Amino acid sequence: MQPRFVGRLGVADAVTAANAALGFVAVVAATVDVALAARLVLLAAIADGLDGVLARRYGGTPAGEHLDSLADVASFGVAPAFLAAAVAGNAWGYDSAWGGVALAVCALFVAAGVVRLGLYTAYDTGNAHTEGVPTTLAATLLAAGVLAGISDPTVVVASIAVLTVLMLSPVTYPDLYSRDALAMGALQAAAVLAPAVVSRVFPRALLAWACAYLLLAPRFYWRGEGKRS
């Protein structure tokens, strides 16, 4: 007897499933090494971009868009929230007042990510834009910041709080052009492979690029194709 997914899922769906698995590994890694967890989150972001490329090249499946959002909950909702919680817990302890606040903020981040991804699947799939900060962008900002040397728990938790609000905002973000998505993927790969080289140049460049898109894209960057959940 064959598994139910045989003949129903494509190569892009396999990469999407790998994205979800990377999210789980990132959560485990955050318990021992937050920098490693940040690298795994960026690796999941690369997989998230790759599955879109493969879907356009080989064709998607009816399950694809649903699998994509489910995987993103793990990799760009739970994993970055746990990473931030680990940073706060290591500094303040989970049983302290500030540790409790940090956990609450991280829990709200996950909830906002779930809502944002549900709305994306229901209303934005197939469009050239989406409302609210994409979960992949939010996770990339946090992971790049950690790899760039931002370790102050107050800054990390405050960043999570701001991104929580922005994910549910009505601000419209255009999808990336393919060439720009490729450039971002290359920066993410460089930050994964060599996060500390030349005074952390790659994660710092990635953080600057992601911040520029966060702040400037709604007004100055417009296009007509792509996918960014």
Image (cartoon, rainbow, N blue to C red):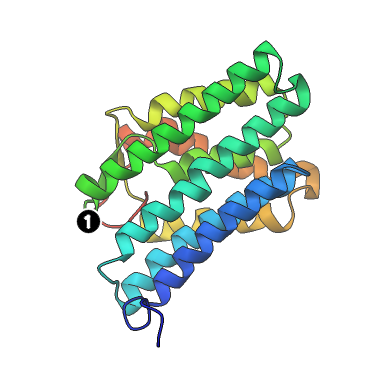
Q: To which quarter of the image does residue 91 belong?
A: top right
Spot occupied by residue 74 in the image (x, y as percentages of width and height): 50, 49
Q: Residue at x 40, y 24 (%)?
A: 165
Q: Nearer the viewer, residue 92 or 205?
A: 92
Q: Nearer the viewer, residue 117 or 103?
A: 103
Spot occupied by residue 12 in the image (x, y as percentages of width and height): 40, 71
Name the outermost residue toward the front: 1
Spot occupied by residue 1 in the image (x, y as percentages of width and height): 40, 88
Q: Residue at x 70, y 43 (%)?
A: 30
Image side of residue 153 versus residue 132, left or right = right
Q: Residue at x 45, y 47 (%)?
A: 73
Amino acid under disc 1: Gly
Vertical position of residue 31 compared to residue 187: above or below: above
Name the outermost residue toward the top: 97
Q: How many neighbours does mark 1 have within 10 angstroms: few (below 14), some (14-19), or many (20 or more)?
A: few
Image side of residue 135 versus residue 18, left or right = left
Image side of residue 170 versus residue 68, left or right = left
Q: Residue tagged by mark 1?
A: 126
Q: Dot 1 lies on which element?
A: loop
